Image (cartoon, helix red, strand yellow):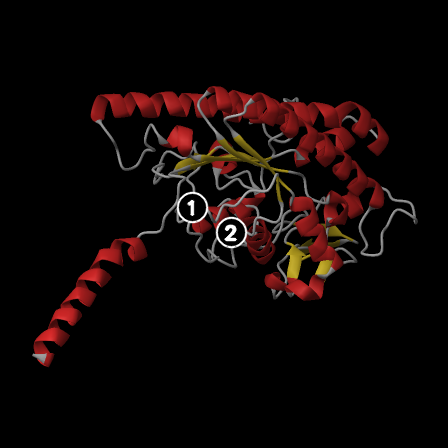
Amino acid sequence: MKVQCLSKYFLVGILAAMAILPILSHARCNYPAMFNFGDSTSDTGAIHVVFPNNELAENPPYGETYFGQPTARYGDGRLSVDFFAKALGMPFLSPYLQSVASNFGHGANFAASGATARGTDSFIAPISLTVQINQFKVFKQQVLASIKGHGPLSYLPSAEAFKSGIYTIEIGGNDFSYAYMTLNLTTAQVKATVLPKIAKSIGGAVQALYNEGARNFLVRDVAPQGCGPFWLTYFPHSSNDFDKHGCSISYNNAVLHYNTLLRAELSSLRKQLKDATIIYVNTYDIIYNFFANPSKYGFKATTTACCGIGGKYNYRYNIQCGTSGILNGRTVKAVSCSDPSSYISWDGVHWTDEANRLLTQHILSGQYFEPSFSLASSCDLKTI
């Protein structure tokens, strides 16, 4: 009798365990797809397709840390968008413009290096945010037409994914560069004349995507540019323009002013688009904290780039990462440091793989979302 009872309870236990196996083996996420818009901070290969054999990120040492080779990403490895996709249980997003080996089943990446939020006279690249939104519209039309003609296709997002997917926007930094470098504006002039237009452009993009059915938005601000080697070397600075962490006060103040404008723009949109979730992502505070407390995060170098030719900031605009040039009468090459993970800046402009990983970890914590928002309540987030 005891053996029979034990066998009975054992069988019940097995059946109960089998019942929860599907829950354990399949990660839950309410976002079936991700659609990203941005610049080189999240471009996973678009600019390479547009201008092949003409980009720094196509050459070593780009990609060396994670991929072991260049993948047209501006970094030594993964970008924040890569880590974010992984956390949601998705593969890396394929660039929309990539025709070979792409899989759009979990969304698409429309970001392109050099892109600006506002249309410019092809400052770096012609794929502005407006162009990216138009590409998305074409993509959606073609996907829906394919589904209508052939039924669901594993390599394309479902029709529902366009409504319930998550839309991420990370752009604006190049608009600052354009204003300073091409228009020759001061930080005061940029604050007054350019930054309000950038914020409006971002708001317009959210509205346009909303009109296409999008309802879930994560909009990132601009990080502290004044801490980057490019900003510290390309532009002149007075002796009192540096804070205690070596960052430019004036250029960071311009970014903070813009981020305030972006907050206000998104707040206004929330009042109008009441059935949408529009989240401001405060990356500025995350990144600045890396510079303020580097040892806390394992960084040994802050305002110095990993890849360069030496000097205080290890950065020269005319001899950038992976390229060669003449310096003091001899040929030199900008090469990678021995331990990129101990650096915040990879090439003077973009973050290292490790900085991107930590940045994304902080974003996923939910502490830097405005208003308060929990990704973890919608997805079983993967460890990154």
In the image, residue 18 sits, relative to residue 115, either above or below, namely: below
Q: Residue at x 52, y 57 (%)?
A: 64
Left or right: residue 102 compared with residue 310: left
Amino acid type at circle 2 is Arg
Q: Which amino acid does label 1 sit on?
A: Phe
Does residue 70 lie above or below 1 as drawn? above
Residues 180 and 171: in front is 171
17, 57: nearer the viewer: 17
Picture coordinates of residue 299, whole percent (x, y): 67, 63
Q: Looking at the rendering, which quadrant does residue 279 occupy?
A: top right
**Residue appearing at x 57%, y 27% in the figure:** 129
Q: Residue 112, can we see it? A: no
Q: Mark 2 points at which residue?
A: 78
Residue 137 coordinates in the image, percent (x, y): 44, 21
What label sits on residue 336 in the rendered view?
none
Where is the N terminus found, in terms of image quarters?
Answer: bottom left
Q: How many labels does the image show?
A: 2
Tell me how far mark 1 sits from mark 2, CA to CA.
9 Å
The numbered mark, 1 or 2, whose residue comes first in the sequence reads 2
Q: Which of 141 and 311 is in front in this view?
A: 141
Which class describes the residues within 10 Å of circle 2: few (<14), some (14-19), or many (20+)? Answer: many
Q: Which residue is drawn at 72% across and 30% down?
A: 261
Q: Is residue 67 visible?
A: yes
Question: Can you tell which mark lies on residue 92?
Answer: 1
Q: Residue furthest front?
A: 1
Which picture quadrant has residue 382?
bottom left
Judge whether 378 appears above or below 214 on screen. Answer: below
In the picture, measured across the screen, residue 316 lies left or right of residue 63, that is: right
Examine the image and state in which quarter residue 56 appears.
top right
Residue neighbourhood size for the residue with mark 1, other residues' Cα within 10 Å, grouped as few (<14), some (14–19), many (≥20): many
Query: Quick one: 139 or 77, which is closer to the camera?
Result: 139
Q: Is residue 309 above or below residue 117?
A: below
